[in-house]
Image (cartoon, rainbow, N blue to C red):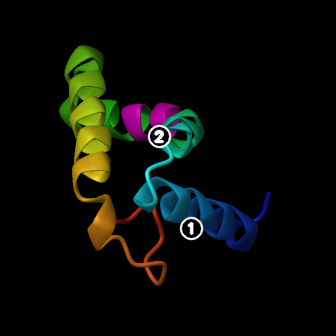
């Protein structure tokens, strides 16, 4: 999947999440968790801490879902 299609899919998932569809959050976690954990583990040099940080990040995605704007890429938001 190219970057544009991925961004469109993420935007669609965030729109669904903003309307209360928690399955959309599960889909976002499935799409992005591994890459986010690998990135965090490289920075933190601690895989367990990286998992905790990424879990917290997804909690924040849920809590602040109304603030998401499709002009941002999900990965950098």
Query: What residue is rendered at 38% in x and 40% in y?
Result: 39
Percent position of residue 26, x then y:
52, 35
Query: What residue is rendered at 46% in x and 34% in y?
Result: 33
| Left or right for 64, reference 71 | left
Q: What residue is pinned by disc 2?
A: 22
Q: What residue is pinned by disc 1?
A: 11
In the rendered image, the quadrant that contains the C terminus is bottom left
Q: Nearer the viewer, mark 2 or mark 1?
A: 2
Q: Secondary structure at mark 1?
A: helix
| Mark 2 or 1, nearer chain start | 1
| Left or right for 54, reference 16 | left
Q: Secondary structure at mark 2?
A: helix
Query: What residue is rendered at 26% in x and 43% in y?
Result: 57
Give the residues drawn in magenta, as a range: 33-37
Quadrant of residue 65 in the image?
A: bottom left
Query: What residue is rendered at 48% in x and 71% in y?
Result: 73
Disc 2 crowd, CA 10 A, few/some/many (<14, 14-19, 20+): some
72 versus 49 height, above or below:
below
Q: CA distance from mark 2 to mark 1?
A: 14 Å
Find the residue positioned furthest to the front: 20
Our reading of the magenta stretch's main secondary structure is helix
């Amino acid at each position: 999947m190219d970057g544009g299609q991925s961004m469109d899919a993420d935007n669609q998932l965030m729109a669904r999440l903003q309307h209360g569809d928690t399955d959309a959050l599960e889909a976002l976690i499935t799409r992005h968790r591994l890459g986010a954990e690998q990135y965090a583990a490289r920075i933190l040099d601690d895989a367990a801490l990286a998992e905790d940080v990424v879990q917290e990040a997804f909690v924040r995605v849920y809590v602040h879902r109304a603030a998401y704007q499709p002009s941002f890429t999900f990965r950098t938001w």
